Image: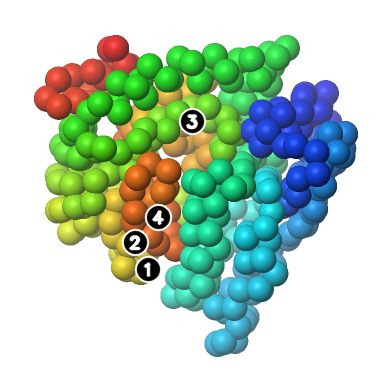
């Protein structure tokens, strides 16, 4: 079990900065025993300020059992208590860890989709309340062997990678994240004035209308670590083709060599060199699944390698990513779906982004 003095610092950052938790607030903490040291530190930090920690300990292996063995009428069941929590909690924090990142790869995709659709209302309620500032949410990943193996690192190396990406090696991580916020704010203010973006890279030429949309400065509040700026595209305003550099990892399945063609904001054609059938099932999950929900630029230069975990990979400095499915209401976008699947394109080797016809980003770096 990982023991490190930075874990207490981690919990303090979560309470004071990520969630801005206040005395008397109801905090729902979700995690599993692998992450016990962080759960313990977070529980203590929550009590210290007079907030109310509520633990939901889960076992990822049982999700496989449920999706495989639940009979019809149960596989699409969602406990009413989960919706009650989503409607009333003040904050939610999720800690990712698992013994096996591939534990759902053998589950029938149709059953997964049925369960995902049933839980779609929970996702929409969370996004709605979050956009109205009625609740805060955040998530992190606790270093564990399965994630280290996916990233092709030793456990000690991977733990250091996580601590470094979270800026936990600094004496005052909160101060460092506020510097990130200040630095990214100039890019957000610039992008808020842009009508159309054009992304160009090998195999990619994509135009995205963003006029009137709000760009979000991601600096450690919802995702931890963080490092991106994003918005939701104008409905029907995306045209072109995009070829993704890295696999999309969804429910333990790796979808490689993804290429999407978009017409009026909808995926018109989709190809992949591996798991293409599964990609198409995701796009057919519901009415909003084949529509673009997010466009973003990764800015965390401490993350420079692909790890097969989207929490880190979408923040890769020098990349952009888009997501099919649910949009974030705070951007002004309205697409609704039970899914939100991010896909990443490298721009560090000759890629560029144009704003209203002028290059402002080249080879993975902002020029403004």
Q: CA distance from mark 3 to mark 2?
A: 24 Å
Residue 79 higher or lower than 261, as above or below: below
Residue 42 lies left or right of residue 101; in this view the side is right
* Residue 346 drawn at (x, y percent): 32, 30
Looking at the rendered structure, which numbered label has been put on residue 285?
1
Mark yes or no: residue 64 visible.
yes
**Of the residues under marks 4 and 3, which one precedes in the sequence?**
3
Looking at the image, residue 141 sits to the left or right of residue 115; the answer is: right
Q: Position of residue 178 (x, y in %)?
A: 57, 18
Characterize the local packing of mark 1: few (<14), some (14-19) or many (20 or more) Cα atoms within 10 angstroms: many
Q: Secondary structure at mark 1?
A: loop
Give the alpha-carbon distance from disc 4 to disc 1, as whole Å. 12 Å
Q: Is there CB contact under 8 Å for labels 2 and 1?
A: yes
Q: CA distance from mark 4 to mark 2?
A: 7 Å
Instruction: Looking at the image, tell me whether mark 3 or mark 2 is earlier in sequence order.
Output: 3
- Quick one: label 4 or label 1, which is nearer the N terminus? 1
Q: Position of residue 246 (x, y in %)?
A: 37, 40
Circle 4 or circle 1, nearest the eye: 4
In the picture of the structure, the residue carrying the numbered disc 3 is: 218
């Amino acid at each position: 079990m990982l023991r490190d003095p930075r874990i207490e610092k981690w919990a303090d950052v979560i309470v004071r900065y990520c969630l801005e938790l206040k005395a008397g607030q109801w905090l729902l903490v979700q995690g599993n025993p692998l992450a016990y040291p962080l759960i313990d530190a977070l529980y203590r930090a929550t009590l210290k300020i007079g907030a109310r920690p509520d633990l939901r300990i889960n076992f990822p292996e049982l999700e496989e059992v449920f999706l495989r063995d639940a009979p019809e009428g149960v596989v699409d069941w969602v406990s009413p208590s989960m919706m009650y929590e989503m409607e009333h909690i003040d904050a939610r924090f999720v800690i990712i860890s698992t013994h096996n990142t591939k534990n759902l790869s053998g589950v029938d995709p149709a059953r997964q989709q049925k369960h995902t659709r049933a839980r779609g209302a929970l996702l929409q309620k969370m996004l709605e309340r979050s956009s109205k500032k009625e609740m805060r949410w955040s998530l992190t990943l606790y270093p564990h062997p399965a994630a280290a193996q996916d990233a092709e690192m030793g456990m000690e190396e991977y733990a250091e990678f996580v601590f470094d990406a979270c800026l936990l090696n600094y004496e005052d991580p909160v101060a460092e994240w506020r510097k990130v916020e200040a630095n990214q704010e100039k890019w957000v203010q610039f992008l808020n004035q842009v009508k159309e973006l054009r992304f160009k890279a090998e195999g990619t030429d994509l135009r995205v209308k963003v006029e009137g949309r709000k760009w979000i400065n991601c600096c450690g509040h919802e995702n931890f670590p963080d490092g991106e700026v994003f918005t939701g595209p104008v409905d029907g305003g995306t045209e072109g083709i995009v070829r993704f550099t890295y696999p999309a990892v969804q429910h333990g399945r790796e979808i490689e060599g993804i290429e999407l063609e978009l017409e009026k904001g909808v995926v018109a054609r989709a190809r992949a060199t591996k798991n293409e059938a599964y990609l198409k099932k995701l796009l057919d999950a519901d009415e909003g699944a084949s529509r673009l929900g997010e466009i973003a630029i990764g800015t965390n230069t401490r993350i420079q390698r692909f790890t097969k975990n989207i929490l880190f990979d979408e923040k890769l400095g020098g990349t952009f990513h888009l997501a099919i499915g649910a949009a974030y209401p705070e951007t002004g976008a309205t697409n609704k779906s039970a899914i939100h699947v991010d896909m990443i394109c490298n721009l560090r080797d000759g890629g560029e982004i144009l704003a209203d016809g002028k290059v402002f980003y080249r080879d993975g770096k902002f020029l403004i």
